[in-house]
Amino acid sequence: MSALLSIEGLSAGYHRKGLTLEDVTLPIGKGRIVALLGANGAGKTTLIRAVSGVIDLHGGSIMAGRATFDGRDVTRMSADRIVRLGMGQVPEGRLVFKTLSVEDNLAVGAAVLPRGRRTARLDAIYQLFPRLAERRKQAAGLMSGGEQQMLAVGRALASEPRLILIDELSLGLAPLIVKAIYDQLKVIVAEFGTAMLVVEQNARLALQYCDEAHVLERGRIVLSGTAAAVAGDPKIRESYLGLGEARQGDAA
Ligand SMILES: Nc1ncnc2c1ncn2[C@@H]1O[C@H](COP(=O)(O)OP(=O)(O)OP(=O)(O)O)[C@@H](O)[C@H]1O
Ligand SMILES: [Mg+2]
């Protein structure tokens, strides 16, 4: 089965800084939740920028390899065209339009849809996140961090994407709201068949929700496997989950 998004041998970097990503290969199947784990500065956000057509806006570029989305080469394609092909994004730091209302933020996401489909899509998002419905006329900047993250997910979903790239969903949010949003991501996958690439520093959390995981270290994929296989890997247990053998011994 061919992947929905296929990243093959991708190398990328920023002006004069050498390679930030080196020979990254990562397939994402339809309706799968795939986690990308890694420490600060590993290159997770850079990978999202590279496949979503915005790396040049950050002074970077793709040096080698390619990304294919639903059989089409999207390497170096414009961000706008990539969104229209069905790849949505929840960027690092959420970046909702703070002065616009909740509804207008969602409308921006839905703008790529034919007019006749927009209202139904927004209604579906309000069903997934009732808090957004309650606050639909409120300025996005006046909502809590968790609500803004829900809005960022809703805005990405509004364009009816087949894949959503999500960068650091949990950052700075209370565990309960993070769990609530992750639970809804599962519902979105089940209801709409949307695939997701979830970038997380919180490996424990991501491994609870994903089907497969890849670990990025200094721009290279050092481990790939099912969520269970990655969670059981001794190095991951030690370095990412705080469950090393020594610690287990300490606790006993
Ligand atoms: N616009 C930029 N210009 C130059 N270097 C950059 C730029 N953005 C990121 N970098 C560098 O590229 C490397 C990877 O950064 P990136 O933001 O992709 O990491 P990350 O895995 O997302 O980290 P974090 O978990 O902190 O978000 C870092 O060394 C960073 O300093
Ligand atoms: Mg990042």
Image (spheres, grey):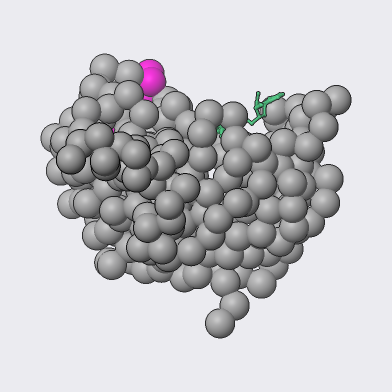
Numbered range of the magenta stretch? 98-102
Q: Is residue 86 visible?
A: no
Q: Is 26 above or below relative to 50?
A: below
Which quarter of the rendered picture does the C terminus lie within?
Answer: top left
Query: Could you tell me residue 39's position as x and y percent?
Result: 51, 34
**Viewer-proximal residue, 251 or 39?**
251
**Viewer-proximal residue, 90 or 62?**
62
Residue 113 belongs to the span the image colors magenta: no
Characterize the magenta stretch by its predominant secondary structure: loop
Query: Could you tell me residue 48's position as x and y percent?
Result: 59, 43
Instruction: Indicate left or right for 177 with 38 as reference.
Output: left
Question: Quadrant holding ligand 1?
Answer: top right
Q: Residue at x 37, y 68 (%)?
A: 193
**Viewer-proximal residue, 117 or 14?**
14
Q: Residue at x 24, y 52 (%)?
A: 184
Query: Could you tell me residue 214's position as x and y percent?
Result: 52, 54
Q: Residue at x 68, y 53 (%)?
A: 24
Q: Is residue 59 visible?
A: yes
- The quadrant in which residue 250 appears is top left
Which quarter of the rendered picture does the N terminus lie within?
Answer: bottom right
Count of all numbered marks drawn on residues in the image: 0
Q: Is 121 above or below relative to 20?
A: below
Query: Could you tell me residue 109's position as x and y percent?
Result: 44, 43
Q: Residue at x 22, y 51 (%)?
A: 183
**Viewer-proximal residue, 215 or 117?**
215
